Image: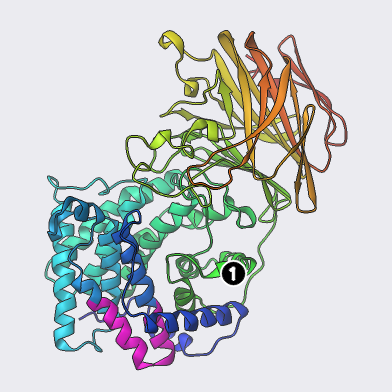
Amino acid sequence: MSEAKIFLSPEVLKRLRGGLRTRLQLSAWEELEKMVEVYLSQPEIEYCPGEHNCLLNRARKAQKVFVTLAVHYFLTGQDRSLENALGVLDQVCGWERWSTDAMRAGNASPLADFDLSYGENCTTLALGLNWFSDQFSGVAYERVKAKAVVWGMEPFLHFCQREHRRHWYGRADSNWNTVCTGGAGMLALALKREYSDWHKVIRHTDESFQPYFKLLERTAGGWPEGIGYWNYGMRYAFFYLMASGDVLGSPHPLTRAPGVRETLFFPFDFSPKGIGCSFGDVNTWSPNPFHHAMAARLGLSELQGHIDRALLALPESERWSGPWPKAAEYLLFHPRSPESRTRRVKKVQKRYPEMDWGILADQMPEPMVYASIRGGSTAVPHSHIDIGSFHLVMNGHCVVRNITVEKPHAEYMDTTFSPRRFELAEMRADSKNMILVNGVGVQHPAQAELQPVKVGGKAGFFLDLTQAMGISRDHKPAVVFAGRLFLLLGNQGLLVIDHVKLPFTGRVESRFHTPFAPGLDGTRAHIKAGQTRFTASFASTVPSVLSGGQTTPTLPEPGLHLLRWCTQTREHMQVVHAALFGRGVVRKIHLEIRREALFLDIPGLWLKPHRFMGGLRSFLR
């Protein structure tokens, strides 16, 4: 049996029983008690067979119930919580299938698969075997251990063999890697003295992890699957690293790998004031307790305070919600040290290398004006056709946002991960805030380099989208040139300039989506969010028209509102569009090109009539 407890050092147990001190700890305890009462009254793990990946949802529910009851037992010593926690493990042992795909194929063999459900079930069994080895009866322990070996260790080693190797093994940019291998690695640590091949599992886990952490080094902590899948993949990555340190007695080497400290700040960069501004599936994020645990182990006290403040900013109904046992794990992982203040950074212009995502903000972490911009490649898991798109947050409201896979706008279905994925409304280019040429946006796959620039003293990013626009009639390039420029106007707003040159006459549109119903007034759109007013003002070098509309998401729910800045006719071969999104009221702007120099006139305080040269030469080519 394991000599050391995963996540449960003597210091942690002492802290758990040392009383509750802060508002968040009390909030977590109240939620924990409510959940325990529910779980004690409903001991069976229930799930909906009609849901997408239903057996993964069952595995996740089992882990949430088990950890919640276990932590409640550690805090209170109540036998009923212990008995029901062990009952969850017994239910997992009775499951005849772990994989939804295997169930749909009618395959009940343990070797049918090793998918996310296996990784999550392995984690649950690992914690159970490690935490309660002394509380099990001999028969119950042997039953759980046998299930762990036959359904966890043996399938994992089978699918790690080169001839059977699954797609997730060694995958640098997929959450599947760490969920599957991290879960198996934790189970091997829990069986260290019981399973002779535990070291083989650890070797494969460490080998599979290496490319994942090498990618974090190259991206300076960025994660190409976005903030939602950052939480998922990193949860199991860091769980394994922390468990390895606890059981083997020294920190896992990857804990201090380049990119690890930086990645702990990544989700905050793409969720200003808790608003998801990421790209791809699951554009939502809230702090998860493993984040606290890693920040504590790396001595990042400032980040710990930042995490606590983000949790406090959430409504009580949302703070501990979700698929994970957040209330229990918060009590387990939180060091109960005082919050530290977060330093404010002014005039942020940050690009994540290799993945080419960028942010602009007047200040962080509490911006008045913030934009996230998507460069890079769509050839990554969970991507959409969104190269060149962006999100815009002003005064705490997401004024411009892509349609994406997040409720109420979408859900996972059989088509989501099928060959028809990119026919879904939430995936397509016309559902993103981007340039459309002759009715279509960038192709898939596509990529574009995000280039930091400064124009007229304003920080921004430039994207050359020429190749990303793909081909058109007669299999020839759709555009001669397509470029997009973003400029941050301090705490006043964001300027977006699109330049398109066509091989033949055609139609050009700059499309934007907003959750607020705009009022159109010529070349301006007035947007009201509560008591806050915003203005979108448009200009063009050719006759263009501003029109509205509403999107139709896959779910039968209201969509977003459209702002379409489109050429009146299709008789132009060169078009420059400008869109200025500002706080308050913005008067009409004027735009023209003279001798390959762009002249922009914005009445008011932000930019005086300016002749953009130098940094715009490539943009105006």
**Image position, residue 34 (x, y; %):** 49, 81
Identified at 36% across, 35% down, the residue is 420
Q: How many callouts does the rendering have?
A: 1
Figure quadrant of the C terminus = top right
Q: Tell me where the magenta segment starts and ends, as one range.
A: 68-90
Label 1, on which residue? 308
Dot 1: within a 10 Å radius of its alpha carbon, few (fewer than 14), some, or many (20 or more) residues?
Answer: some
Task: Report whether 210 appears left or right of 446.
Answer: left
**Image position, residue 382 (x, y; %):** 41, 43
| Residue 31 visible to the viewer | yes
Identified at 25% across, 61% down, the residue is 118
Identified at 34% across, 77% down, the residue is 66
Task: Report whether 239 appears left or right of 534.
Answer: left
Vertical placement of residue 146 versus 352, above or below: below
**Image position, residue 253 (x, y; %):** 34, 61
Q: Main secondary structure of the magenta part?
A: helix
